[in-house]
Image (cartoon, rainbow, N blue to C red):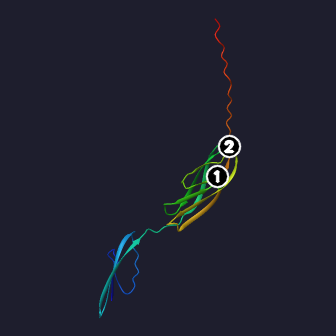
Amino acid sequence: GFDWDLGDGTLGGGMTVTHAYTQAGAYTVHLLASNACGWAAMSHTLSVVEPCTPVEIVTVTYSAESCQVSLSAELTGTAPFTWLWDMGTLGTSTETHPLFDLGQTGTYTGTLEAWNCGEDGYAVHTFSVDVFCTTEYKIYLPLLFKGAEN
């Protein structure tokens, strides 16, 4: 016969056993197999992890101040997430809320790639940002001093 101890207080019998663990954790499973000739025992530790919901990119938003753009995104799925913002020739960032200096007025296209679930979850989103760079002009006027008359 086959006698199983599944490590969480659950016992089973038969050549195969199916069991759903209710909590994440490490469980040591013991099997005792016996017949008319004797018995054999073995054990194995299982690692049960929480189910992971793959990442989805809901929205990408930005705020622009002059030529500098701050990017943000709303993601769903099981955290933690890995981020990769790509603004082409302007560079990349792995920050959650990166800041890019776009340099001049225009419409720019970028992509956000996000991973989770041990990199089994993946999503990509293309976005565009419009920036209007303001230029500050400073005028320097010479100061004239007139000497005091005696």
The residue lying toward the viewer, choosing from 56 and 97, is: 97
Which residue is denoted by mark 1 in the rendering?
90
**Vertical relation: 41 (above or below) 59:** below
Q: In the rendered view of the protein, which quadrant contains the N terminus?
A: bottom left
**Vertical relation: 36 (above or below) 30:** below
User: Hey, which residue is sitting farthest top in the picture?
Assistant: 150
- Viewer can see residue 5: no
Q: Residue at x 62, y 53 (%)?
A: 91
- Viewer can see residue 98: yes
Residue 13 lies in quadrant: bottom left
Image coords of residue 81 (percent x, y):
51, 60
Instruction: Give the secondary structure at mark 2.
Output: loop
At label 1, the amino acid type is Leu
Q: Residues within 10 Å of mark 2 (few under 14, many from 20)?
A: some
Which residue is denoted by mark 2 in the rendering?
133
Image coords of residue 51 (percent x, y):
46, 69
Image coords of residue 135 (percent x, y):
68, 38
Q: In the rendered view of the protein, which quadrant contains the C terminus?
A: top right
User: Of label 1 and label 2, which has the lower sequence position?
Assistant: 1
Q: Residue at x 41, y 81 (%)?
A: 18
Q: Mark number for residue 76?
A: none
Q: Closer to the camera: disc 1 or disc 2? A: 1
